[in-house]
Structures are given as C-alpha cells and as structure tokens.
Amino acid sequence: MTAAPCSAVICESGPLRWKTQINGVPKLQGVFTMRDQEGFPVDMSYEIAKERGWEVDWVEALADAARQSILKYDALIEEIRMLEPAKVESVQKIFACGLMSCEGKTFCDKAAHLYKRMRESHLPNAKSAGTDASEKTP
C-alpha cells in the first residue's frame, strides 16, 4: 500500500475517506453516505474495513445520519449494535459530547454542525489540535 501524505480521499468521485488514528489504525469515513446515496450496505462497508485492518468511524457516520433525521440516527445505532455491540455505548457517548459543543436549535442542526466540523477537520492540509494532520490514501 503506497501512502500519499496530506490526502484524505479514497475515491475522488465518492464520499469515502480514511484518517489515521494515533494508534496507526485507519478509520473509514463516509460509510453512512455510501448507504444513503449509493445504497451500499453499512455491514458490507464494515466487513471490508475489518478485512483490511481498518475501523469504521461510527461517530462520523452517526453525525451524517443524525443531520438528516432522528429515524436515520436510530436505525444506524441498531446497525452498529448488530455489528459491534461492545462499541455502541462508547460511540454514543463520544457523539453526544461532540453534539453538546455544536451550535443549532434542533438535534439535526447540531448534528449537521458536528458532521461539517468532522469532515472539514479531515480534509487535506487541515490541522486540528492534538491530532495528526497528515492524511493518507491506500
């Protein structure tokens, strides 16, 4: 796998990206967008990520679902519960903490703000406090 620094895009024409965590494990973003826009199942994205030693960025996926509707958020929580039951509670807590720091009058407004902030912070050349700003593509 050849890595190009400062690039967060896996597919130039699609929503998938990955970022490298502090522990070095890539985290796949755009999983909910792929399901919502392209009809690609979340469980298949999860399995592909798992086969490659990656993790799915469930917090980003929840923010994406929640910015659209509480029903999509609830449905995604159930999918996460089926795929990674041990992570549901921690993912929800991280999402809730991120949501509390966001502007907006409604749940969906706050989620949209969180989603935008997360996606912008992982664009090439983005710098966020306490994270590695160098992004790579597989």
Image (tube, helix red, strand yellow):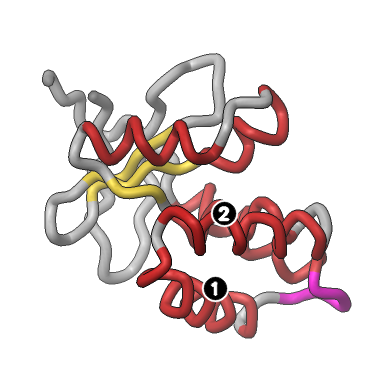
- Front residue of 103/32: it is 32
Which residue corresponds to the image point at 27% horizontal and 50% vertical from the top-left? 133
Q: Kindly identify which numbered label has been placed on residue 95.
A: 1
Image: magenta residue range: 103-107
List x then y, in percent, for residue 131.
26, 62
Q: Which of marks 2 and 1 is in front?
A: 2
Mark found first going from the N terminus, 2 or 1 = 2
Query: In this image, 11 relative to 76: left or right?
Result: left
Compared to 91, does 13 lie above or below?
above
List x then y, in percent, for residue 58.
47, 57
Assign a secondary structure to mark 2.
helix
Q: Does the magenta stretch include residue 109?
A: no
Query: In this image, 7 relative to 58: left or right?
Result: left
Magenta span dominant secondary structure? loop
Answer few, some or many: residues within 10 Å of disc 1's Cα (few below 14, many 20 plus, some between 14 and 19). Answer: some
Q: Kindly identify which numbered label has been placed on residue 79.
A: 2
Compared to 3, does 88 lie above or below?
below
**Residue sticking out furthest to the right:** 105
State the CA–CA distance, disc 2 to disc 1: 16 Å
Answer few, some or many: residues within 10 Å of disc 2's Cα (few below 14, many 20 plus, some between 14 and 19). Answer: some
Which residue corresponds to the image point at 33% horizontal and 69% vertical from the top-left? 129
**Where, quadrant-wise, is the N terminus in this rendering?**
top left
Q: Which amino acid does label 1 sit on?
A: Phe
**Residue sticking out furthest to the front:** 82
Q: Kindly identify which numbered label has been placed on residue 8.
A: none
